[in-house]
Image: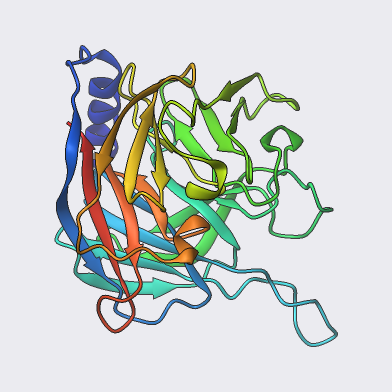
Amino acid sequence: MRSVLASMILASLFIMPSAQAEVLAKAETIIKIPMAVAPSTRPQTVAYHPVLMHYYVADGGLAPLGSATEQPISKSKIHAFNAKGEYVNTAGPGFDNRSIYYNPNSGQIETITYNVSSAVGFAPMTGIFGLVVGDTGEIKSSSTEVAQFNAAFGDAFTMPSYDAKHKRYYAKQQRSNKVFIVDPDKEEAVGEITLDLKAAGAKLDDVADSFIAFTGIKGEELVLLDVDHKAALVFNLKGKFVAKSALPKQLKLRAKNYYNGLGYANDMLFLYNGSEGEFGTYYGLKVVK
């Protein structure tokens, strides 16, 4: 029954006509997810499973150097939450997670690791992996391999976003306005987008370093966090600036938000507010409506 429901959701995503979207002048806070345990390393991205209706928050951090007594496996964790943002459990699949997302083509939550491009040399547990979740949404410590490293992703620090319809990724390059379009079956990027930051009133030092969100909304496909101006910048797939959405005033951004504490899931931009709650809180924001 669950697989049938997942197929129905996937089909509806592909055949529903595109409604006229609107970039909200002020982003709306839809959900808050307070972290229930301290991040094992540093909080990274967020995924949402539409069938199980659970959110998953990934930590990211390099693995320790291997030794005679310890394998080079990252201690980073994945944290599961229900649809209301209530904590479910934590597990350690062993990856230095950079991006996690729900893939309707495979019906699973997947993670992309640090250095997926192998730009700084090959290391174990590098690539794209499927994360195993239980029937009631809890995250497990087991996983399956989806793809090995691929140079097409470019920068080692990139946090790619997934386009399920076209089965490709958008990988923002570090300290750059370039976004690589990646077909996982090709060893070179199949395209490149140059973001018009000047039209958006921003500079490279203002915006998120390695993450850009993919919305799936025609003409307003890409969302980039502008930390310095506390706004979400919306671009199309040609890199043309469309509009900006002001973030809530109570949301406190820090230098870390240039590099982590980001995500896009369930049609929301997620940002980590490290100063709210004992272990920080993720805000789920509606930017494009």
| Residue 165 higher or lower than 30, as above or below | above
State the residue at coordinates (30%, 74%).
Answer: 35
Q: Where, by quadrant of the figure, is residue 10 drawn? A: top left
State the residue at coordinates (56%, 43%).
Answer: 204
Q: Where, by quadrant of the figure, is residue 50 drawn? A: top left
Quadrant (top left, top right, bottom left, bottom right) of the C terminus: top left
Along the line of sight, which residue is nearer the eye, 5 or 287? Answer: 287
| Residue 80 higher or lower than 209, as above or below | below
State the residue at coordinates (46%, 39%).
Answer: 202
**Residue 44 drawn at (x, y percent):** 47, 60
| Residue 95 higher or lower than 239, as above or below | below
Quadrant (top left, top right, bottom left, bottom right) of the N terminus: top left
State the residue at coordinates (69%, 54%).
Answer: 126
| Residue 74 higher or lower than 174, as above or below | below
Q: Is residue 178 left or right of residue 49?
A: right
**Residue 29 drawn at (x, y percent):** 16, 52
Residue 163 in view, yes or no: yes
Along the line of sight, which residue is nearer the eye, 10 or 223? Answer: 223
How does the figure colour the protein chain or chains? rainbow
Q: Where, by quadrant of the figure, is residue 267 drawn? A: top left
| Tally of numbered discs | 0
Along the line of sight, which residue is nearer the eye, 192 or 239? Answer: 239
Q: Is residue 101 left or right of residue 66?
A: left
**Residue 81 drawn at (x, y percent):** 26, 65
Residue 267 in view, yes or no: no
Along the line of sight, which residue is nearer the eye, 70 or 46? Answer: 46
